[in-house]
Amino acid sequence: MTGEFAAFIGLALVAVTGGILMLNVTKVVHMVVSLIFTFVSIAGLYVLLSAEFVAAVQILIYSGAVTIIMLFGIMLTNHQDENEKSPGRLKKLLVFLGIIAFAFVVYKGIYQLDFGQKTPAALHEKNTEQIGIALFTKHVIPFELTSVLLLVALVGAIVLAKKEEEDEA
């Protein structure tokens, strides 16, 4: 067993455990913490795949920004955890069986996958440069449309916030 395989197994177990915990814990803050574990371990898997830029983006965007936004949303809303019921044994058993079935299907799909004989690509060399070139040449229109969409969402949020302030006054 190589060190890379051991790291993959460890990171995969942390990712899957974080996902399962996120679905099974009852407190919302604990769900966010387990989601952070999942995001960080997925970033580690990207590092194993020689995609350091994608791993850094995973850490910055998902583990940082999205998690902070979720925590702010949780703190700014009122949650009554007393009324929540814990899932029954039958539901837990069905979820476990569903996870096992999904893992089996993914396992069979991966080992029956055939890419054919292609020449190996040098994906690990200058991958950030390759992403930049692809983003600003082949995919420049979707990139610009995404930035316009984010700008429209920001302006819309400001307009809605101003309208609520005016209604209260």
Image (spheres, helix red, strand yellow):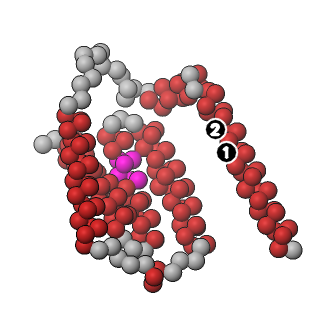
Magenta stretch, main secondary structure, is helix
Question: Who is closer to the viewer here, 155 or 9?
Answer: 155
Residue at 58 percent of width and 77 percent of height? 78
Element on which disc 2 rests: helix
**Quadrant of the rendering where the C terminus is positioned:** bottom right
The residue carrying pointer 2 sits among few (fewer than 14), some (14 to 19) or many (20 or more) residues within 10 Å by Cα, namely: few
Quadrant of the image occupied by residue 132: top right
The answer to whether residue 47 shows anywhere in this view is yes
Q: Residue furthest bottom?
A: 82
Between the C-alphas of marks 2 and 1, the distance is: 6 Å
Residue type at the position of mark 1:
Leu
Q: Quadrant of the N terminus?
A: top left
Q: Position of residue 109 (x, y in %)?
A: 24, 36
Residue 162, above or below 106: below
- The answer to whether marks 2 and 1 mark residues whose Cβ atoms lie closer than 8 Å is yes
Along the line of sight, the residue nearer the viewer: 165 or 56: 165
Q: Give amino acid for label 2.
A: Thr
> For residue 108, which quarter of the picture?
top left
Q: Magenta includes 161?
A: no
**Residue 10 seen in this snapshot:** no
Answer with the quarter of the image where residue 114 lies. Answer: top left
Question: Circle 2 sits on which residue?
Answer: 146
Residue found at x 63% / y 38% = 146
Q: Residue at x 79, y 67 (%)?
A: 164
45 sits to left or right of 139: left
Q: With 156 as the anchor, is 63 left or right in this view?
A: left
Q: Which residues are magenta?
A: 39-44
Residue 13 shows which numbered tag?
none
Residue situated furthest front in the rendering: 90
> Mark 1 — residue?
150
- Check disc 1 and report its element: helix, strand or loop: helix
Q: Give coordinates of residue 68: x percent, y percent.
A: 54, 62
